[in-house]
Amino acid sequence: MYNKKPPFEITDAILSDVVKIGELVGQVGSISDLSTSPKLRRENRIKTIYSSLAIEQNTLSLEQVTAVLSGKRVLAPPKDIAEVKNAYEIYDHLAAMDPYSMEDLLAAHGVMMRGLVEDAGEFRSRPVGVVDSRGNILHFGTLPEYVPALIGELLEWTKTSSLPVLIKSCVFHYELELIHPFSDGNGRMGRLWHTLLLSQWNPLFAWLPVESIIHDHQQEYYQAINLSNAQGESTPFLSFMLRIIKEALSEAIVLSGEVPASRARQKELRWAAIEHYLLAVPVLQNADVQRLCGVSSATANRILNQLCKEGKLEKVRTGPYWSYRKPKEQ
């Protein structure tokens, strides 16, 4: 029950991340046209939809998703095309939704899953087990007769708690997954509502493709959910999602067309993006640096070589490729 709060702990690391995210939000707001450029907003919205659906095994590539949303014909399963169109429609109406309304939550699910499941826009009426990609049962969702009351209490806690929205949105995301209120679409609804809650705090989150960073760290995303399930509290998931939000903001700063001209500042921002990325994965490669820093392969090589010279990274062989990691003593 959520008459007080869902179970989680606010650690020193979580508090530190909340403060850091606040600083990054200020930086993005001052140097990026993320909230005002129609072209950039559309590109990021498409990235968001592609990534959130790819997590759910949608087969369309980013280029195909772009084509579908441009009205072009795409040779792909009709179900996958419908998922893209539905998701774009509901994300396009994000600003009109009340993040604390059960009616809006159900209506959003109705659009997201329209034509895909018979009970779109309704809570499930049957018990359900949550399984991973291999068919292993991760946990059993809440019995259907308790779902409406628990979702109502979760929405009320999220609305009335005095905790920062950064924390509440992460907790809501996890608890929705845990309750598993719908027969299908729970993952994409959890990510949609997380974005909605954050965008009510700061509008730039409506256009920041956090879902694309989750997709990059999909294995860690599920691991964080599983660890929270095992511990009976959302602290691991909360920590993971704050790290993902930091990475998304750092990437937005680095990729902004208005990155400060100072070479020292540019270098600092690039290292921040790489360091945040290495919090979630053991190694990175040239292609990762190209994406994180918005640079060519040659520039990525120069960045990596310089970081190795400075002792911030070390070069290691992973299979047939060279990779980079933080030195063990760090």
Image: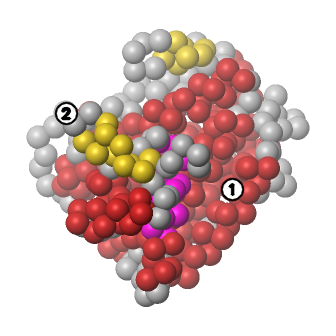
In the drawing, what numbered circle is on residue 247?
Answer: none
- Rendered position, 153 above or below 131: below
Residue 215 x, y percent position in the rendering: 41, 43
Classify 18 as above or below 49.
Answer: below
20 or 282: nearer the viewer: 282
Dominant SS type (magenta): helix
Dot 1 and dot 2 residues touching (CB under 8 Å): no
- Give the image quarter of residue 322: top left
Q: Is residue 44 magenta?
A: no
Picture residue at 59% right of the left edge, 49% below the top: 330
Depth-wise, is mark 1 or mark 2 nearer the camera?
Answer: 1
First reached walking from the N terminus: tag 1 or tag 2: 1
Helix, strand or loop status at disc 2: loop
Q: Amino acid at mark 2?
A: Pro
> What residue is at 80 percent from the left and 33 percent from the top?
7
Q: Position of residue 266 (x, y in %)?
A: 45, 77
Task: Specify the quadrant of the image occupied by residue 19.
Answer: bottom right
Which residue is identified by label 1?
Answer: 17
Q: Is residue 185 left or right of residue 166?
A: left
What residue would you read off at disc 2? 77
Q: Residue furthest right?
A: 4
Q: Which residues are magenta?
A: 269-281
Figure quadrant of the N terminus: top right
Give the residue displayed 39% in from the left and 15% down from the top: 134
As rendered, which of 308 and 23 lies closer to the eye? Answer: 308
Quick one: 284 or 180, which is closer to the camera? 284
Q: Count neighbours of disc 2 (C-alpha within 10 A) and say few if under 14, some if 14 to 19, many if 20 or more.
A: few
Q: Tell me which amino acid carries mark 1.
A: Asp
